[in-house]
Image (cartoon, rainbow, N blue to C red):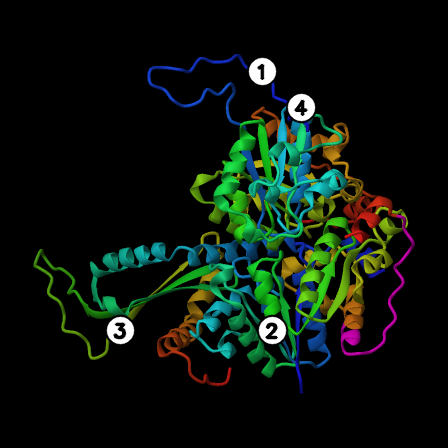
């Protein structure tokens, strides 16, 4: 069984990496996969908070890297699922408390115990990003259909290409009404600019704020319209061909598209 | 190339005294304010652009510095992306002068942008040179606003290095608040950061589904500059490169102007968004669907 | 439809939950960031308690645990001997050490916590101590195969 090590990254902060990591992990676990989530955002950890596991942290990523504990001792098992665990980041350390080899080694060890290892990457393209990517064999880039986010995603795609990692794209926080009125780029526009295989389109949903407040991944809510969306992404990750829900309406975007396509 | 407009002239002061060797300065140093947050995507760049615009519209001379090397966005938000000829690292590495690199804003007369480099890395920025650059800008402008990158790594440290004051931007969400708290700790005693709460959704707050301004204040306990509501208009203006602060009479534009006034030291109340209720919300309220 | 009904009849909001969780998380973050403060607190605590009992200063453990609605400080302070209570001005004389040192466990909950929370904190001490003890033993012993979780 070869397990998959996927880094969830974006460049731009605040587009939904952590939310995506949490929900993809949850959706995979619900399908019976063994999943380990790793928070690589040392110093600004949030994966624990988003999943409501902040009170159960005993050891963290850096302590594992420094050999002060075993990986198994640091993993927090999410009791809402059969097989979902998280490795929290350290909060009071800096991102250079760990190097690429150490991080990659931890990811390898996690991969021995899981079908999927998802790495929640910090924002930016500095040390934290480099470490997070070092451990992964593939990447999911998350972007919103906004100019700044796409520009940053483009930069990240370039860096991932340099390292030869296969990349897939999730377009997050889509607002259909704004695409229709021409105020937001369409998914088609985004894909054309980034030229990366699309694996998911997630509409904007204000319920995410509410569920994050409670520390519950939104896929736990049977009534959430995001639950089937994440399920579809998981199926695509598993190799199924699943048609995309048609949120798309053509939108004209003039100078910005040209500027972005020009690079 | 354009010279930045010298701000309102002050009479030349004769500061020479016996044995003094320091150069005369005709005016005080401008204020260098870093806009930071920890968490990405909460509105640092939007805040920098709008605050800078509002200050400039009020007559101050303002330089905006994009410190997000490799992931620049301040230029796009201002609609100046096609006018950037030289960037921060060009200046730091002496390939261009400040005059050559500073881009005049399209809309506000006294507003200038120093863009980040896009294809370089943050660790290529020399901290001491960055401090010297900010100082040089302070000698020419009333305000130097530094748009800080997300995170707390080297990019953050360099952005903070030249600043004397800090504005922290937070959204009413748990991760953002936690990150701001961390950043305030890292900023240390040198700064007394002031808070801008961004992307508030009054209706969600009313339903109890979002932290309120009071909640955030109770947790962070920072002096509040103002609160900006979330609205789709902001995305539109970013797309068009026209900061909302240009519309002084619209609610969000007015809010940025109020914040600018407060930054300038005026005794103006902190702007708060007003709830616009929909029919359903009013109906819900009728049936008691209110937060306790 | 359900959404409509939810909005019509109201649902308890999550913002109160969020605020509580944040408050506790930040306290923990702050404590982690100030180890010197914790050391000072330990010393002061021990000084005060030593006025009444003789303690084993080398084996004191102070830890912080997040509980449901509070942050609790758990201090495990082994007692070596207890001073005889003073009678009519005579000087204290220490009693001989018991066969096994007893322990003082102090639980200080965060303010504004309802008493059931504090009670629950007291009751769950054993569980907390066990977990924390395992952690400290693990740290002291260094890496080795751990027992099943």
- Labels 4 and 1 in the same subunit: yes
Q: Which residue is mark 1?
A: B9
Quarter of the image where one finds residue A227: bottom right
Q: Which mark is residue B213?
A: none
Residue A207 picture location, percent across and down: 74, 57
Q: Nearer the viewer, residue B91 or C61?
A: B91
Nearer the observer: mark 2 or 4; the answer is 4
Q: Is residue B64 above or below residue A169?
A: above
Q: Looking at the image, is mark 4 or mark 1 earlier in the sequence?
A: 1
Q: Is residue B109 above or below residue A200?
A: above
Residue B167 picture location, percent across and down: 57, 39
Q: Secondary structure at mark 1?
A: loop
Q: Which mark is residue C102?
A: 3
Q: Which residue is mark 4?
A: B58
Q: Secondary structure at mark 4?
A: loop
* Distance (Cα) linking label 2 and label 1: 65 Å
Mark 3 closeness class: few <14, some 14–19, many ≥20 residues within 10 Å = some
Q: Which residue is mark 2?
A: A78
* Distance (Cα) linking label 2 and label 3: 37 Å
Pick out the residue farthest to the right: A250
The answer for which chain carries disc 3 is: C
Instruction: Work out which quarter of the rendered image holds the N terminus of chain A and state it.
Output: bottom right
- Labels 2 and 3 in the same subunit: no
The residue depicted at 58 percent of the width and 26 percent of the height is B142
* Distance (Cα) linking label 3 and label 1: 77 Å
* Distance (Cα) linking label 4 and label 1: 16 Å
Q: Secondary structure at mark 3?
A: strand
Nearer the observer: mark 2 or 3; the answer is 2
Quarter of the image where one finds residue C40: bottom left
First to last magenta residue range: A234-252
Residue C58 picture location, percent across and down: 25, 68
The residue depicted at 75 percent of the width and 33 percent of the height is B251
């Amino acid at each position: 069984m070869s397990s998959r090590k996927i880094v969830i990254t974006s460049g731009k902060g605040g587009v939904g990496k952590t939310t995506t990591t949490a929900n993809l992990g949850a959706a995979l676990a619900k399908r019976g996969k063994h999943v380990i989530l790793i928070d690589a955002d040392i110093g600004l950890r949030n994966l624990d908070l988003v999943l409501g596991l902040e009170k159960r942290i005993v050891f963290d990523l850096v302590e594992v890297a420094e050999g002060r504990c075993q990986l198994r001792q640091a993993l927090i098992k999410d009791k809402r699922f059969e097989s979902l665990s998280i490795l929290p980041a350290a909060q009071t350390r800096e991102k250079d408390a760990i190097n690429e080899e150490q991080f990659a080694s931890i990811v390898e060890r996690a991969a021995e115990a899981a079908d999927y290892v998802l790495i929640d990457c910090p924002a930016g393209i500095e040390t934290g990003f480099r470490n997070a990517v070092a451990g992964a064999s593939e990447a999911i880039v998350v972007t919103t259909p906004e100019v700044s986010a796409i520009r940053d995603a483009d930069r990240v795609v370039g860096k991932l290409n340099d390292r030869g990692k296969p990349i897939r794209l999730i377009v997050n926080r889509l607002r259909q009404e704004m695409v229709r009125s021409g105020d937001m780029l369409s998914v088609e526009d985004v894909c054309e600019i980034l030229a990366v295989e699309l694996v998911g389109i997630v509409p904007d949903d204000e319920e995410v704020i509410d569920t994050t407040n409670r520390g519950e991944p939104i896929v736990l809510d049977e009534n959430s319209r995001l639950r089937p969306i994440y399920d579809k992404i998981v199926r695509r990750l598993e190799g199924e061909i699943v048609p995309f829900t048609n949120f798309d309406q053509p939108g004209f975007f003039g100078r910005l598209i040209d500027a972005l396509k020009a690079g | 190339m354009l010279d930045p407009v010298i701000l309102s002239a002050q009479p030349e002061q004769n500061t020479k005294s016996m044995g003094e060797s320091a150069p005369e300065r005709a005016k005080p140093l401008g204020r260098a304010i870093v806009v930071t947050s920890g968490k990405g995507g909460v509105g640092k760049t939007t805040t920098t652009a709008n605050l800078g615009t509002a200050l400039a519209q009020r007559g101050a001379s303002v330089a905006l510095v994009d410190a997000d090397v490799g992931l620049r966005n301040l230029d796009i938000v201002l609609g100046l992306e096609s006018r950037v000829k030289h960037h921060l690292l060009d200046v730091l590495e002496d390939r261009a002068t400040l005059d050559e690199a500073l881009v005049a804003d399209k809309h506000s007369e006294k507003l200038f942008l120093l863009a980040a480099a896009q294809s370089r890395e943050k660790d290529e920025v020399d901290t001491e040179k960055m401090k010297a650059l900010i100082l040089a800008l302070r000698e020419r402008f009333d305000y130097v606003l530094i748009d800080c990158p997300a995170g707390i790594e080297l990019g953050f440290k360099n952005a903070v290095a030249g600043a004397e004051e800090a504005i922290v931007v937070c959204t009413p969400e748990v991760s953002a608040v936690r990150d701001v708290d961390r950043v305030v700790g890292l900023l240390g005693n040198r700064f007394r950061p002031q808070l801008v709460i961004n992307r508030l959704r009054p209706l969600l707050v009313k339903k109890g589904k979002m932290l309120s301004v009071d909640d955030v204040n109770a947790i962070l306990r920072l002096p509040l500059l103002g609160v900006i509501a979330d609205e789709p208009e902001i995305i539109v203006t970013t797309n068009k490169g026209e900061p909302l602060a240009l519309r002084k009479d619209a609610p969000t534009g007015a809010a940025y102007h109020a914040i600018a006034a407060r930054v300038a030291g005026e005794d103006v109340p902190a702007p708060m968004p007003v709830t616009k209720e929909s029919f359903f919300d009013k109906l819900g309220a009728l049936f008691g669907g209110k937060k306790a | 439809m359900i959404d409509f009904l939810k909005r019509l009849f109201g649902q308890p909001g999550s913002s109160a939950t969020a605020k509580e969780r944040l408050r506790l998380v930040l306290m923990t973050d702050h404590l982690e960031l100030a180890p010197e403060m914790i050391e000072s607190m330990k010393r002061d605590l021990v000084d005060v308690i030593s006025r009444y009992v003789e303690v084993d200063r080398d084996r004191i453990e102070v830890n912080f645990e997040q509980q449901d609605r509070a942050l609790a400080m758990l201090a495990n302070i082994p007692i070596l001997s207890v001073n005889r209570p003073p009678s009519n001005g005579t000087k204290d004389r220490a009693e001989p050490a018991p066969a096994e040192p007893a322990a003082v466990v102090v639980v200080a909950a965060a303010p504004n916590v309802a008493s059931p929370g504090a009670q629950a904190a007291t009751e769950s001490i054993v569980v907390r101590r066990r977990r924390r003890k395992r952690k400290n033993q693990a740290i002291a012993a260094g890496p080795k195969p751990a027992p099943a979780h």
